[in-house]
Amino acid sequence: MNKKSRLQIPRPTARPGEKPDFSYLDLAAAGSVDKPAIDARTRDLEHLSSGLVRVLDDDHNAKGPWNPGFDPAQLQVGLRWMLLNRVFDERMWQIQRQGRISFYMQATGEEAVSIAQAMALRPGDMCFPSYRNQGLFMYRGVTLVDMMCQCLSNTRDMCLGRQLPIMYHSKSGNVFSISGNLGTQYPHAVGWAMASAIKGEDHIAASWVGDGSTAEADFHHALTFAAVYQAPVILNVVNNQWAISTFQGTAGGQRRPFAARGLGLGIPGIRVDGNDLLAIYAVTLWAADRARRGGGPTLIELVTYRGGAHSTSDDPTKYRPKDEWASFPLGDPIERLKQHMIAEGHWSDTKHESLIDELRTEVTAAWKEAQKHGTMTEGPWLDPGTMFEDVYAETPNNLESQRRRMLEIEKGE
Amino acid sequence: MNKKSRLQIPRPTARPGEKPDFSYLDLAAAGSVDKPAIDARTRDLEHLSSGLVRVLDDDHNAKGPWNPGFDPAQLQVGLRWMLLNRVFDERMWQIQRQGRISFYMQATGEEAVSIAQAMALRPGDMCFPSYRNQGLFMYRGVTLVDMMCQCLSNTRDMCLGRQLPIMYHSKSGNVFSISGNLGTQYPHAVGWAMASAIKGEDHIAASWVGDGSTAEADFHHALTFAAVYQAPVILNVVNNQWAISTFQGTAGGQRRPFAARGLGLGIPGIRVDGNDLLAIYAVTLWAADRARRGGGPTLIELVTYRGGAHSTSDDPTKYRPKDEWASFPLGDPIERLKQHMIAEGHWSDTKHESLIDELRTEVTAAWKEAQKHGTMTEGPWLDPGTMFEDVYAETPNNLESQRRRMLEIEKGE
Amino acid sequence: MAQMNMIEAIRSAHDIMMDKDPSVVVLGQDVGYFGGVFRCTDGLQRKFGEHRVIDAPIAEGGIIGTAIGMGVNGLRPVAEIQFADYIYPGFDQIVSELARLRYRSSGEFFSPVTIRTPCGGGIRGGQTHSQSPEAIFAHVTGIKTVMPSNPYDAKGLLISAIESDDPIVFFEPKRIYHGPFDGDPEKPAVSWNSHPKGEVPEGYYTVPLGHADIAHPGEELTIITYGTLVHVAIAATKETGVDCEVIDVRTLAPLDVATLVASVKKTGRCLIAHEATRFGGYGAELVATVQKECFYHLEAPISRVAGWDTPYPHAFEWQYFPGLKRMSAGIRKVMEAQ
Amino acid sequence: MAQMNMIEAIRSAHDIMMDKDPSVVVLGQDVGYFGGVFRCTDGLQRKFGEHRVIDAPIAEGGIIGTAIGMGVNGLRPVAEIQFADYIYPGFDQIVSELARLRYRSSGEFFSPVTIRTPCGGGIRGGQTHSQSPEAIFAHVTGIKTVMPSNPYDAKGLLISAIESDDPIVFFEPKRIYHGPFDGDPEKPAVSWNSHPKGEVPEGYYTVPLGHADIAHPGEELTIITYGTLVHVAIAATKETGVDCEVIDVRTLAPLDVATLVASVKKTGRCLIAHEATRFGGYGAELVATVQKECFYHLEAPISRVAGWDTPYPHAFEWQYFPGLKRMSAGIRKVMEAQ
Ligand SMILES: Cc1ncc(C[n+]2csc(CCOP(=O)(O)OP(=O)(O)O)c2C)c(N)n1
Ligand SMILES: Cc1ncc(C[n+]2csc(CCOP(=O)(O)OP(=O)(O)O)c2C)c(N)n1
Ligand SMILES: [Mg+2]
Ligand SMILES: [Mg+2]
């Protein structure tokens, strides 16, 4: 091969050692995108996929038609849960670094996604999360202790030791079991929503995938089925710019926003500032109402930034500038909401710090409690015999005899 | 479940016994769609996906910017090959009905797709066909005898008896091996095109799937990779309104045209009259030039109608009006080209009939010749021992011994 | 009692379960208005409406993926994959999701999906309409893999599958949809009309999952098989005059080991037969299990009669298919061994 | 000669082949700039450019599908699937296309794709980072299935795979990327530094596909295994004091039957071991083959030591993993049988 390759290779704007460059991000001023009626025709919504719905402006004011008009109490709720998410993540990260859990993944910088959307959905709506949606579980009532016990695979682990840390589920909270396989939850959400419609109920479903995961087949299947049957579902793409070391351009994000991915199937797409709790809330509520009234699916792209490493197994300094997050033009969702609340006059740095302290204490207390149910090095221990259960509704003979054999061997027989 | 289902179910406009109704088809007058420069920006091409490029108008004149200005010889070529495709299909259908081959699929009503596109591509461009693209093989030099021998699984069968009838391939003609699995060829075409770019060559690839097959994962994968690497490839969706008994609305075709499916990835789409040889030729040439010059992929939707049954195993009167084809607003591609040539003054009904006679004679002669190489009931026979070859580049021991065992058993040992 | 072929029996199972349980829904390609390319769902949409019998897009992964979601929301989806050869695009959803959902959520979530799919050759379908991929599913823990060999079992097993809270992959050997087949393609087709297993109750009944059936009792040799080859094995018993016990596995996973072992301990000889490719096929597991449990009773090596290790070739279907000749040769070989 | 771990050996195989043959290209998730999550392709993009070492979208089906097209156009693609657990979305392209292209086009078209993927547990990966799905691929005719157990073989086999015109699925047991592992998680980690199979020529060499290796000669019992368990088997040989012959299958399909059979005929006893789920696993085929060929030499039933028939549980990794204890117990059991 002598000739020069003509293949076009997408490249991030900056690599380690280079100056972060977010010039590729199409931004829009807060309040500049219109808010159509929820029964607007799909073809009249196309522009929402290339705009950027924002409510909080640079001066920390809430602006424009998408402003949900939160009262101080609602703002507090949003801030509190985002902070709890962050404080929890920080602690669990530390704990993993100390070798006390095997693995962890943070949502740092993306907390607004789960919290705002959880606030906008109704309790009967079903969530099909990705691994970066721990905020959904928290908001929907899974206790910190239970989440920690899952990460510890201890005697109180909701997964009975079967899943990697962070692969939570909550039946009572209507949050589906997290899978290690990217994107598989997307068609589940659509099927769940179809069933809701078939049953004549008005619950809707929502699901989340990352920018990178949009390339998977399940993304296409979900969009196709949702469009064909007008399933009452919200399909969220959390565009945090990175998929491990691969930037979003490798999933086609440089060509058109992810919000546009469903347009060819007639699915409206809304691109929203993923670090703006108020904007996300409003957009989600709009899409939920639309779905509930028979308007079918909406695809929401949440533009944000993965503030931390992909997981505890990852070292992002190998592939992106160290300080990229600091230059991210949409900032930090917690800081932005805090400043807004301060600007509104019912919050302060002091209050903020003491809330953080309070939450840290809460997390510390939870960690103490969680460890009582067992750690990686100390009991009590889960009964290994349970590993043969729940493979089927009833444990068949072959698994029963394998269980016996395993216990014999464990006892050295 | 007491409540009424709210699921939305797509329905065709007419079922057996009902009056055909193509009011759902967005049409456009011949010549009404503009022809952008091949280096136009993708965002300036979006309108092409909802328009309908047509050259031949209702009065049989060729009109507008997409008119390729064929000379009489070129028109003859187009007509001849479309007719040959139809005459061949008719004969093979009959032959299957007589029980002399096991299976057959026609391209009736869709002949313009393969012929016009084969004319527009260069011999070095690689085609990844679906099972309704027999016209590509014919045009690219596979003889009728060879095609018939494949359908007969006889001693001259290019597939050595391994594939169902119509699953041709042609290495020398640069037409890929047809798969029974829908849509799988789409990413192959993209990979082939990427390799062409990597090697610095200017060959492009083209692939075809049906409207129904767009729902498969491979469609999504192909579009994603083509968009990300700007692969020099033409991705065709042959929208013949039906996928066996399932109409195109079940693949989402009622919401937006298939040509729009790539817009969300920045792939320009062109919707073209699939029964207009001139329009298809022009659109394909445009997309090929664009790809060759580094402009990346184009998605072409060819709007046509499956004039016959899905295959010899199918009975379309069970699910669609008998006379639906006759009401199809885009008519019959052969009839339309014929009328155009008559209008242009260098063709006539008599010439047309004698061309048909000539082609029938050619097909009859080919069938006679083909049968000499064996039929389903009479020899010569393929050596069944060959079934163990080509599983791997070299036949491994286990297959060699299975071959011996099979031959022993055949001989009654 | 009515006389039914397998298609009618399968249709009847759907009909009864949809009547009985409003949460049963059917989805798949061409299953609705048209009633399925093999007619297994014919009439169901007319009776139960297009909200319970749903024509789906051509996306096996999407069909299975959405069916899982429906199951999580309280429905009991029965998904048809048009040919087993086309199940692979749905493989990830089956293996990674459907099979492991209950386990990974410690029983909180599950989805009782039944996936029906026609398998096997003998209808001139060529390599992409003839496959028998059951081994691949039987290896995946968390799903149950079933293959009936006659109308009675088809209906009873399908009802059990639909009622089961476990996910099921239900293979239907299409060669015997219309009649049993003894493996000799030269003979005229036989229908289920005159076959005792074509007698099928019109109402509700079940054949339990996880139980093999002794399709033909015998003393000299045990043939363990399933699907179409059950009939070939019985025919070969007659042809060879060897007094074979033919066991129809019916549920491939979890396997009814006891029935197999009891038989082989009695006969001392064992032949295993399936249509799928031999290497790494389901028969290997049968050999492994039987040799382990019956080692001291075996008078001859366990033999396998199976499809060759090639794709299923269109023109050589009958050379590929392990028919009467191969089955009889297999029986003789095991009997000759000392 | 250099000392390499398996990752370095695999990287070296890529490097040498990319140098030697400009048609070799690499694609996969995170393989380019970053060099792969396990670092197997580290440095290759810097050396060979981003047109030959391509970061791909997260779509295993797309990676394999486009790789097939590249192969048809004269390239020799090496595709990395980040974990074997994530190969299923590409399963249809492997089974229906890659494996059968040569056959269905009677040799006119083929695509020499090598698919590399890390498999197996022992790294606390939980159920979606620990699977060993080799049985599913070994059953698919038209592809070759390979699993090395050490750096020397990894490099030599990978070079053979890349050079082969056949499609290869190349499993890399990630537990032994950095050092051999004798199956006892309590012991300190060992590196390849001091292991003879960690001595790897820096240049080009091949280990031929289709040949098993006698990893440890012995007379009393044959252990047939592959991947990580080769090391566990050798350790168990020492622990039990039984003079085992440990055979490393290396190429799972097509299988080197002769080497296995010769060994079992010599020892008269056979234990088969793998990490994957037992039921329907690759071990079943090994049992079926050995019992058929060595029936009259076997003094005891062939036993299997394998993963249990459950998903791979995070907390019970060491109860699931067939480690030293289980291997030794397996050996003793086969030795006790009369
Ligand atoms: C099917 C599958 N392929 C590959 C992986 C390995 N993997 C885990 S996370 C990840 C990146 C995902 O990126 P993105 O979708 O953008 O989500 P994010 O991590 O940014 O939230 C990859 C490739 C996987 N888990 N599943
Ligand atoms: C993966 C796969 N699923 C299902 C089928 C069965 N099947 C064969 S053709 C067909 C309909 C295809 O319709 P379309 O894509 O519109 O093409 P057309 O036949 O109209 O040309 C179906 C469902 C298949 N061949 N492959
Ligand atoms: Mg991301
Ligand atoms: Mg069609």
Image (spheres, coloured by chain):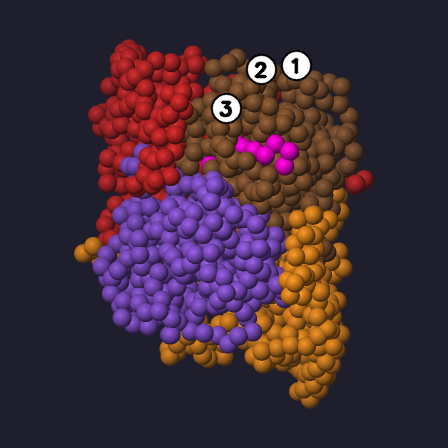
Chain colours: A orange, B red, C brown, D purple
Question: Label 3 vs label 2: CA separation?
Answer: 20 Å
Instruction: Report crowding for label 2: few under 14, some 14 to 19, many 20 or more residues within 10 A (C-alpha).
Output: some
Q: Nearer the viewer, residue B362 or A362?
A: A362
Tell me the residue that label 3 is attached to.
Answer: C328
Residue at x 81% of width, y 40% of height: B2
Circle 3 SS class: helix
Chain of residue at mark 1: C
Chain of residue at mark 3: C
The quarter of the picture where the N terminus of chain D appears is: bottom left
Tell me the residue that label 2 is attached to.
Answer: C190
**Amino acid type, mark 1:** Ser
**Count of marks, rendered view:** 3
Front: mark 3 or 2 = 3
Residue C278 belongs to the span the image colors magenta = no
Q: Which mark is residue C194?
A: 1
Instruction: Report crowding for label 3: few under 14, some 14 to 19, many 20 or more residues within 10 A (C-alpha).
Output: many
Secondary structure mostly seen in magenta is: strand
Tell me, yes or no, if residue D176 can be seen here.
Answer: yes
Instruction: Report crowding for label 1: few under 14, some 14 to 19, many 20 or more residues within 10 A (C-alpha).
Output: few
Circle 1 SS class: helix
Chain of residue at mark 2: C
- Hey, which residue is sitting farthest left in the picture? A2
**Amino acid type, mark 3:** Ser
Question: Label 1 vs label 2: CA separation?
Answer: 9 Å
